[in-house]
Image: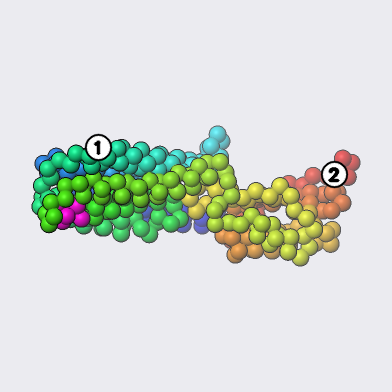
Amino acid sequence: MSAEHDHSHSTRSAGSVKRLKIALGLTFVYMIAEAVGGWLTNSLALIADAGHMLTDVAAITLTLFAFWFAARPATSKKTYGYYRLEILAAFVNGVALALLSLWVIYEAIQRWQSPPEIKGAQLLVIATGGLIVNIFSAFLLHSGHKHDLNMRGAFLHVVGDLLGSVAAMIAGILILALGWMWADAVGSILISAIIIAGAWRLILDSVNVLLEGTPSHIDLSAVESTLLGTAGVRGIHDLHVWTISSGIHALSVHISHDETVGHSDLLGVVRDRLHDGFGIDHLTIQMETLNRETEAVYVCETGTKCFEPVRSNFANG
């Protein structure tokens, strides 16, 4: 991995860590407030929101731990380092969100059948405070959630809380204005369903990375067409594209080419096309001449000098 890439990744992580710590502090303080408020007002929506905040605290703490551990250097036994811990944390976050939401739905159904007395005014005030805290936390985490599965997990937790606060506010208004005690349970069910949908997407994306599937934003057939469309390339095989961790993608491929084309010249063209077209920098490319007399293996990254190739003679093979 190049020094340039290390620096950009560490800078991104440092900014993410700072935002996560602020969000963690805010979430923890208001989690206590909502838990106490839910108990005093007898509101399932507030209790559910406090429960979501509890998973937020756990999820953000897990995310911070994953960032810290992923920054550890690679070893002879962990040649990619600990980047995958970020993906494992995202997977755990998604499962926790789904399980908590299912519990809230179960509790809401019980309450829907026999709505308890709820203090609507206190519910509305506490939910409004929760909304303000969640909006600020979501703003802190928004910038990193699109390209980082771990940050997306933390962001989805906060968004779930934000929606929960809105549902609690609406329930409080309906209880105050119309006396609809069941509104608390209905709001909890609707928000939980939305959260489950987001959690399911997070789980699927995490599992895809753990199974080393092709990144969702990369069309493997387009990569193949790009390689085959490069002047001098006569064929490719063993093409693989996978994700090491969020924002870090890798590719390996065997490329056969005309004898008249130099390995290094063709490698530079292929490397640039893969970077410009697909944003893939971590490349392992094995160059093969058509007569199979020589073979060269290159490992390189965009913007860096490739490692010297390892050559083998196949003339007697």
The answer for how far apart the CA atoms under marks 2 and 1 are is 73 Å
Q: Position of residue 112 (x, y in %)?
A: 23, 42
Q: Position of residue 306 (x, y in %)?
A: 65, 55
Q: Position of residue 292 (x, y in %)?
A: 84, 49
Lateral position of residue 255 relative to residue 221, left or right: right
Q: For the stretch drawn in magenta, what is the main secondary structure?
A: helix
Nearest the eye: 180 or 213: 180
Dot 1: what SS? helix
Question: What's under tag 2, amino acid-wise?
Answer: Phe
Determine the residue positioned at 26% across, 58% down. Answer: 135
Disc sitting over residue 314 in the figure: 2
Q: Which residues are magenta?
A: 170-175
Q: Residue 174: name its quadrant.
A: bottom left
Nearest the eye: 32 or 246: 32
Disc sitting over residue 292 in the figure: none
Residue holding disc 1 = 110
- Whether residue 98 is visible to the viewer of this picture, yes or no, is yes
Look at the image and tell me in which quarter the C terminus lies.
Answer: top right
- The residue sitting at the right extreme is 316
